[in-house]
């Protein structure tokens, strides 16, 4: 059970860091930055997990889902929060290197505690990976403060913020594959959960791309319903071609609720952050 306390401690620390940054700047764009960093690192982490680089073991959920829960603690909370505090306080590069070194130590220490396991990954990779991430965070933060950001930047931010919101809603709603799994019968992988996770991520990326284009590009409002039609067709296709395997009394079209909720939350956040990126 000690994993619960250590991973929970990282979540609490993340809220403290984000809260400190918000208290100093009083700027909801910092929350946008947090989610945008999540949108960058989560696909990378999921890919690494599929190649069996390491395994998180918070000890909360069944084994496969527990691994992804640990990834959410890393991707949604502690790593983005460290990037936010660095950008919000304009910390020096020496401070960033110290921060990366701390994460390297934590990565190693969790393996000693038995709540995180390396296969081919090494702790030093974590530290080296954070240095360019902090540079990207600075670039995003500068762009978010610009009064006239480029269209491509606005679309990128919409995509990066929408994708983790969508993914998290679906992860929580699915309750570790209790509602549905996604499968392709011709894919003969050893772990069906990996197949489902790969397909879920492909679907999330597709929907996030459609959402970014139809929310962020200038067009008559009626044309935005084309995006809704594409998303509905995508989810219908998952059911029609037998990819969507329900574990409860639902259909693939019920998944349309996920982007609806995600767009609502995205819109509310951008309004709070005073980012005029949506519905130009």
Image: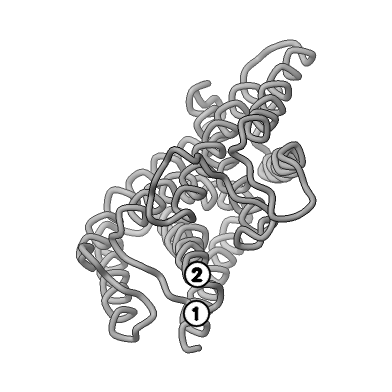
**Does the rendering let one see residue 277?**
no
Task: Tell me if 109 is positioned left or right of 61 in this view.
Answer: left
Badge 1 is on which residue? 59
Q: Which residue lies at the image location 50% right of the left edge and 39% below the top edge?
A: 184
Q: Position of residue 198 (x, y in %)?
A: 46, 45
Of pointers 1 and 2, the one earlier in the residue sequence: 1
Q: Is residue 133 above or below residue 199?
A: below
The crowd level at tag 2 (other Cα within 10 Å; few <14, some 14-19, many 20+) is some
Q: Is residue 189 above or below residue 79?
A: above
Contact check, label 1 and label 2, Cβ < 8 Å = yes
Q: Position of residue 107 (x, y in %)?
A: 31, 72
Q: Position of residue 238 (x, y in %)?
A: 63, 34
Badge 2 is on which residue? 66
Quick one: 234 or 242, which is closer to the camera? 242
Secondary structure of residue under mark 2: helix
Secondary structure of residue under mark 1: loop
Q: Is residue 223 above or below residue 73?
A: above
Q: Position of residue 36 (x, y in %)?
A: 51, 45
Q: Which residue lies at the image location 28% right of the left edge and 64% below the top edge?
A: 100
Q: Which residue lies at the image location 45% right of the left edge and 39% below the top edge?
A: 142
**Does the rendering let one see residue 240?**
yes
The residue most toward the bottom is: 2
Number of numbered discs present? Answer: 2
């Amino acid at each position: 059970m000690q994993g619960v306390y250590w991973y929970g401690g990282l979540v609490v620390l993340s809220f403290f860091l984000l809260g400190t940054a918000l208290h100093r700047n009083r700027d909801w764009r910092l929350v946008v930055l947090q989610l945008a960093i999540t949108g960058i690192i989560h696909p990378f982490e999921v890919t690494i997990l599929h190649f069996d680089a390491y395994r998180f073991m918070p000890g909360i959920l069944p084994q496969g889902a527990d691994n992804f829960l640990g990834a959410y603690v890393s991707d949604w909370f502690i790593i983005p929060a460290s990037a936010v505090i660095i950008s919000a306080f304009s910390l020096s590069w020496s401070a960033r290197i110290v921060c990366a070194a701390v994460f390297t130590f934590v990565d190693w220490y969790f393996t000693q505690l038995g709540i995180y396991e390396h296969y081919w990954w090494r702790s030093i990779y974590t530290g080296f990976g954070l240095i360019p991430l902090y540079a990207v965070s600075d670039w995003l933060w500068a762009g978010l403060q610009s009064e006239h950001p480029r269209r491509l930047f606005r679309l990128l931010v919409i995509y990066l913020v929408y994708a983790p919101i969508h993914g998290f809603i679906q992860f929580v709603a699915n309750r570790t594959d209790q509602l549905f799994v996604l499968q392709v019968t011709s894919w003969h992988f050893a772990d069906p959960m990996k197949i489902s996770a790969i397909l879920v991520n492909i679907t999330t990326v597709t929907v996030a791309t459609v959402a970014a284009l139809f929310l962020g590009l200038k067009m008559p409002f009626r044309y935005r319903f084309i995006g809704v039609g594409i998303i509905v067709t995508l989810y219908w296709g998952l059911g029609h071609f037998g990819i969507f395997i329900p574990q409860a009394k639902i259909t693939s079209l019920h998944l349309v609720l996920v982007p609806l909720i995600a767009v609502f939350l995205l819109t509310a956040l951008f309004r709070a952050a005073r980012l005029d990126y949506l519905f130009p």
